[in-house]
Image (cartoon, rainbow, N blue to C red):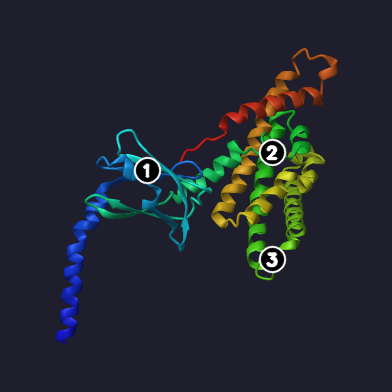
Amino acid sequence: MISVKKHFFILATLVFMLMPMLARSADFIAGQSFGDDNEITVSFSVPVDKAILEDTSRYTVFEEPDPDIRLTVESATPGPDGKSVSLYFQEPLNMVKTHVVTISGIPGKDVVSFKVSKSYFGYLFSILISALLINNFVFTKYLGLCVFFGTSKRKSTAKGMGVVFTLVMVASAVMSWFFYQFILVPFNLNFLQILVFIGLVSLTVQAVDTILRKVNPILFNSFGVYLVLVIANCVIIAVPLILANNNYNILETLMLSLGAGGGFLLALYLMSSVSERMQLANIPPTFKGLPIAFIVAGQFAMAFLGFSGLQIF
């Protein structure tokens, strides 16, 4: 009994002695965040000698789940006032995972350790914005052009097609994720993913076709053959392949499918707005129809290049 009390007293004493040191380390690090794909930025509450900050051997960085795998710091660039440093790595960082950074040899601090992580909400939002604007499947990847040009002549048809396409996209992506995670991966059937994804998309489109035929025959007739073309649309097949390749979870799958569907809806609406105005324009006969449509789509694609490199979180 006395031995237990003695050990408890020693442990409590050590914790009491270490708490001020931990507090000082926390106060010493004013902020930390991911920068570019291969960059971590650290801010200090007080200036630090630039020679110390530039010495890459003082830094130890690893992903929290894999402490044995150390990431190589290629260079360290201190700020002009010595109160910040940017660490650059040889390879892109996996910003989804928490990174542990340790700095040694700082006068008065010895070793300082802290964690760098990205908001998961921000990560989900970045997937949505990326599929919606930055990597729009129509204007940056040039996928789904058959349906895009076929249903973008009037706003009413474009909006209806965009909404239906988004619903089909989300439903097929979620089903594809479940099949991939719980059937294809456990039974090592990854080589069948394209066939399975096409079958799931066909099933979803057939369900939407049946529902629209009963609920809104006018909208169904306005789509014509293009609703059937959704089955072979490159975008609706690309999304399940992307989520499988990146091993997305269900929330990330939802964000990707919503972004892809919303991006397609946005592209249709923008194109239909211009198409209605072009009907009143004096277009040379040579450029009427698809030629002028491709020119306008190319201009939209150039405009969407302005979203490249956009980072909100």
User: Quick one: label 3 or label 2, which is nearer the N terminus?
Assistant: 2
Q: Which residue is mark 3?
A: 184
Q: Which residue is mark 2?
A: 141
Which x, y percent locates residue 18?
Answer: 21, 62
- Amino acid at pointer 1: Glu
Q: Are marks 3 and 2 in contact (CB under 8 Å)?
A: no
Local secondary structure at mark 3: helix
Q: Nearer the viewer, residue 53 or 5?
A: 53
Q: Nearer the viewer, residue 119 or 274?
A: 119
Residue at 58 percent of width and 55 percent of height: 248
Q: Which corner quadrant holds the C terminus?
A: top left
Left or right: 78 with respect to 198? left
Q: Which residue is mark 1?
A: 54
Local secondary structure at mark 2: loop
Residue at 73 percent of width and 46 percent of height: 212
Q: Nearer the viewer, residue 171 or 23?
A: 23
**Mark 3 to mark 2 CA distance (whole Å):** 27 Å
